[in-house]
Image: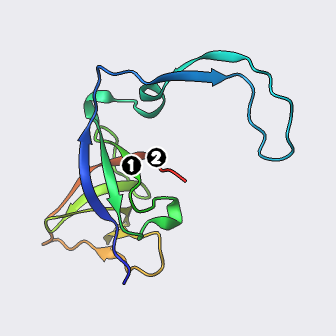
Amino acid sequence: MKTDSSITAIYHIDQQTKVVRPLFSCQVSAGFPSPADDYIDRRLDLNELLIAHPAATFFVRAAGDSMTGVGINHDDILVVDRSLTAGSGKIVIAVLNGELTVKRLVHTDTTCKLAAANPAYPDLEISAEADFQVWGVVTSVIHQF
């Protein structure tokens, strides 16, 4: 049985730790191979790359397969920014009737829903009576192959 995408863990950012790695100035070819330049352009801090607003950012671990159509897989780590506006079309972490979920927020003049990115799952309509809150907007997905 398929499982809906939900959240299995929430992580806070350690702002004291820097994760700095070399950034090569040459691009890696995804087509035909080219000679490597072996030239390091600068050092890259992954916090700097992935986190625009440290005080408003947290990480969550996704569970399930309802968001595979947008590249979010089971056990992926999602970078979530609470300071961003959760507009229509954004991937959000939301609480709907007491349950955390990751979905695309879709709203029109008359409706609001949380849409899965897997056709095996129905959209979650948000009624006026629903206990609904957006926790933040997903800005990045970290997954391993």
Identify which amino acid the numbered label 1 is placed on: Ile
Quadrant hosting residue 85: top left
| Image point (75%, 20%), residue name | 38
Residue 145 lies, with reference to residue 26, above or below; the image says: below
Q: 90 left or right of 25?
A: left
**In which quadrant is the C terminus drawn?**
bottom right
Q: 87 left or right of 14?
A: right
Total labels: the figure holds: 2
| Image point (40%, 58%), residue name | 88
**In which quadrant is the N terminus drawn?**
bottom left
Q: Residue furthest bottom?
A: 1
Cβ atoms at labels 1 and 2 below 8 Å apart: yes
Residue 118 lies, with reference to residue 140, above or below; the image says: below
Alpha carbon distance from label 1 to label 2? 5 Å
Mark 1 secondary-structure assignment: strand
Across and down, in percent, residue 2 comes to 38, 80
Mark 2 secondary-structure assignment: strand
Mark 1 surroundings within 10 Å by alpha-carbon count, few (fewer than 14), some (14 through 19), many (20 or more): many
Across and down, in percent, residue 94 comes to 26, 58
Mark 2 surroundings within 10 Å by alpha-carbon count, few (fewer than 14), some (14 through 19), many (20 or more): some
Q: Nearer the viewer, residue 65 or 122?
A: 65
Circle 1 sits on which residue? 77
Q: 102 left or right of 95?
A: right
The dot on residue 142 is 2
Q: Nearer the viewer, residue 38 or 102?
A: 38
Across and down, in percent, residue 49 comes to 48, 29
| Image point (47%, 74%), residue name | 118
